Structures are given as C-alpha cells and as structure tokens.
Image (tube, rainbow, N blue to C red):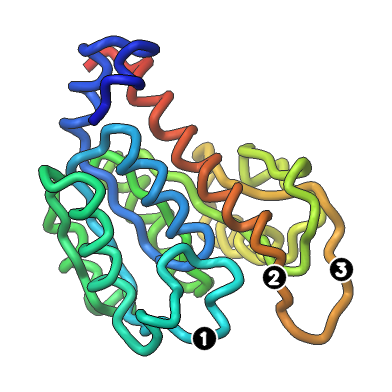
Amino acid sequence: MFQRLELLIGNENINKLHCKTVAVIGLGGVGGYTIETLIRNGIEKIIIVDNDKIDITNKNRQIIALDSTIDKYKTDIFKERIKDINKNCEVITLNMFLNEENKKELFKYNIDYLVDACDTVNTKIMLIRECLNRNIKFISSMGTAKKIDPNKLVITELKKTTYDPLAKVIRKEINKLNITDKIMVLSTTEEIIKTKHLGSYSVVPNIAGILIADYIIKDIIKSED
C-alpha cells in the first residue's frame, strides 16, 4: 500500500517508518488527523490513549465522528479504522484518562515518539517531564480553539510561542520546574477570537494534526538509526 510513498522516499525509509512506535495522547481534532496521517504514511506500531466517547459536537472536526459512531469509545473506533487502513499495523489502545497515577500503563511500552494532543494542563506537563526524563522524542499541541487561520500554524519551541493562552500557561509551569530543555510544540501566531465558549473551525485542528505527523515522519526519515 506504500508504493506511491516509496517512489518519493525509498524502501529504506519506508522500513524506518514501519519500525517506529508512536504514542498519541488525545484523539480529538488534532490527535485524530495525526493518527490518520501517520498510518497512511508507514507507521505500523501505534499507541492511542483517550477515555472519551464520541459526541455529536465532535462531528465538525474529528475524523471518526459520524452518526454511526456516536457514544462509542474513541479508542475502539480508531483501532477499527487503523486496521481497515493497514491490517499489519499493531495498535495498542489505552482507554483511560492519563495522569500521574496511571502513567506507568503508557510508559511500560518502548515509545520512539510521543504526540501530546490532550487538553489537560497537568497531563501535558507530566508528559513533557516524562519524555525529557526518558529521552523520548515528543511534540506537544497547544491551543487550536478560537482560531480560523491555518496559515498561521507553526511548529516551534515553546518559549517562542505567541498569542497562545495554553502555551502561556504551559511555559509558566515549565519555568516553575526549572526545565530548560528545548520543547517542540505545534502552535499558532493568530490572535484568539474573543468568544465566550471554545468554538472550533475544523480546518485549524485538522491541519495541525497533519503538520505534527509530517514533523515526525520527516524526523524519522532523516535519522541515522
């Protein structure tokens, strides 16, 4: 199924992608399109983590949100979808809300890359700390709600983010921990649209997920191992 990709990157790089294990935490608009892009481009070992069921309000931005999947667990539906795309893909599902108490359930696996696409600040901080301590490559998604311009999405260092309220909170917490390592994030330079609730234009989180997957794929391809 990867013949078209192999024409561009070669068989050796396809094999590199097959051998890496990627964990995606949070299966919403960003995480969902990250998974979709990774699986369609050669990743064959993936760990997916979420405890939510699909809600009708997810239909505007989440790739698995359909009338037929409402009220079903996101991990279950994604496993079915991944296997339907590539039956050879090894899929590990963790149907849980990840936190300090249960993080061992995730980190008992050998993870090459981790994508933080969750919404909870404490979990995001924990994932950053754990990845740095365990020498796991990672990228963390910042806020995509209240934004409508996908052209302003960027992958950058956390300390360089602007106009991102979530990134501001994460930076503050990271500074408290005296962490000085480079932390790569997906963010946007767009000013937020001032609305009372977290409105979402699907193009922004969806493209954010694709950009994250692209970042990981290209990093794997250029690696020496």
In this rendering, is residue 92 above or below 189?
A: below
The secondary structure type at the circle numbered 3 is loop
Tell me what residue is drawn at x 29 percent, y 10 percent: 10
* Category of crowding for the residue at label 1, using alpha-carbon neighbours closer than 10 angstroms: few (below 14), some (14–19), many (at least 20): few
Residue 175 location (% of width, % of height):
60, 56
Query: Which numbered disc, 2 or 1, marks the residue that appears first in the sequence?
Result: 1
Type of amino acid under label 2 = Ser
Type of amino acid under label 3 = Ile
Of 130 and 195, nearer the camera is 195
The residue that label 3 is drawn on is 193
Tell me what residue is drawn at x 21 percent, y 42 percent: 21
Query: Which numbered disc, 1 or 3, marks the residue that appears first in the sequence?
Result: 1
Q: Nearer the viewer, mark 1 or mark 3?
A: 1
Q: How far is mark 1 from mark 3, CA to CA?
A: 23 Å
Q: In the image, which disc is placed on residue 200?
A: 2
Type of amino acid under label 1 = Ile
The residue that label 1 is drawn on is 56
The secondary structure type at the circle numbered 2 is loop
Q: Nearer the viewer, mark 2 or mark 3?
A: 2
Residue 101 location (% of width, % of height):
25, 79
